[in-house]
Amino acid sequence: MPEIHRTSELDGELVHDWRELIAQDAEGSWFAGPDWVLAWWRTLGAGQDGEIAVWRGPDGRAEAVLPLTATRLRAHRRLPVEVPALTLLGTGPGAADHCGPAVRPHRRADVAVWLAERARRSTLWLPELDAAHTDLLPPGARPVTRSACPRADLTDGPDRLGSRDFRAANRRAHRRLAAAGVSFHWLPPGTATGSDSSGDLLDDLLRLHRLRREAVAGGAGGASSFAADRLPLHRLLLRGAAPGCGPALQIARHRDEVVGVLYGFRWADRFAYYQTGWDPRWAAESLGTALVDAAIRSCAAEGVRTFDFLRGREPYKYRFGAVDRTDTGWLLPRGPGGALLSLKHRLRAAG
C-alpha cells in the first residue's frame, strides 16, 4: 500500500525523487511533476482536498507518485448541477497537458490496482491523460475527449524543421526585425525570475497576449485560459525554478520595449511551449513566427530534443514540422452524477 500525503508541503527528498521519476521517463511531463502540481495546489487549487500517493522501494526512494484531488464538475454549462469526482491534482484551471502519475515500470501494476480500488465508489475524471498511462486505467473507463498536442523533434537541429521555403522565410523575417532594431534574448530556467530592467515579464506576457487576441478577434478580445488570476501560479513557478529545470522565457525587445514574450517549461531534454504574446504592430514582420523560431533555436542550443507545442492544431505548429501526440480525457462514471457526465460527453461528441 502507498503512503498518503495530504499537504503540499512535502519534504525535499520526496520532491527530488518525484522530479527524477519525471526526468528519467522518456514520456515524462513537466505537468506531472512536483513543481507544477504543488505550485498549482498552493494557488489555483488552494483549499482543495488533495492526496499524493507514494510507493517507495526498499531503499526508501519514491518509485511511483500519484496526485489526486476531489473536485466538482458541471453536468452542463446551463445547469447549476455539480457532480463530485476524483481527478488528477494539478489539472483543471491552468491548462496542464500530458498529465498522469510518475511511475517506474515495475510499479505500474501496483498503481493500477490501487487506483481501481480508490475509484470504486467515486466518478473518476482523468483529463489530458498522456497516452503512456492508459494501462493504469480502471476497468470501465472510457475516452470522452481528445486533444492533439503537436511536437517538433530537434534531434537533427532547428535548420531541418519545416520546408526549405519556410526556413528561408524565417531567415528573412529575422533580418528584417534585426534591421528594425528588434533583438531576441533567452532566459533559461533559474534565471527567469519574472522581472528584469524592463519590469515584470509576466505582466508583459499577459498584456501582449491580450493585445494579440484582440487583434485576431478584430478588437473584441475573446476568452482565454491565460488571465490575471493565473499569475500567482506562474510567479510561484518562477521563484522555485532550478537551473536547467522549469520556466524559461524567450524575449523580443525593440530597443527598451518588450514586444514579445514566449513562456514555457524545460525539463530533461524537453521543452513545453505554454503561452506567448507579441505586439501586433509587428505582424507584417512576422514577429510571432520569429519568436517561436528563436525559442526553438535557444532550446536546441541547450540540448533540448523535443519542442512540445502542447494542445491545439494551429497551422503554424505544423509549419515547424510538428507531429501530433494525443492526450485523452477518460471518464469512469459512478452513480447518477457520473451518468449525467457521461451523457454530457456523448451529446457533445454527437453535436
Image: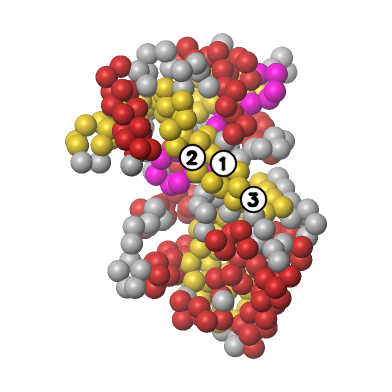
Task: Please report whichever mark, 2 or 1, sits nearer to the chain's N-terminal start.
Answer: 2
To which residue does mark 1 refer? 326
As shown in the figure, which amino acid type bears the numbered disc 1?
A: Thr
Give percent across and percent down for residue 299. 70, 59
Instruction: Check whether the beta carbons of the residues at disc 2 and disc 1 lie within 8 A of each other.
Output: yes
Quarter occupied by the C terminus: top left
Give percent across and percent down for residue 187. 63, 63
Question: What's the magenta region?
Answer: 88-107
Q: Residues within 10 Å of mark 2 (few under 14, many from 20)?
A: some
User: What secondary structure is found at the residue carrying circle 1?
Assistant: strand
Residue drawn at 70 percent across, 23 percent down: 105
As shown in the figure, which amino acid type bears the numbered disc 3?
A: Val
The one of 153 and 28 positioned closer to us in this rendering = 153
Quarter occupied by the N terminus: top right
As shown in the figure, which amino acid type bears the numbered disc 2?
A: Arg
To which residue does mark 3 refer? 323
Quarter assignment of residue 119? top left
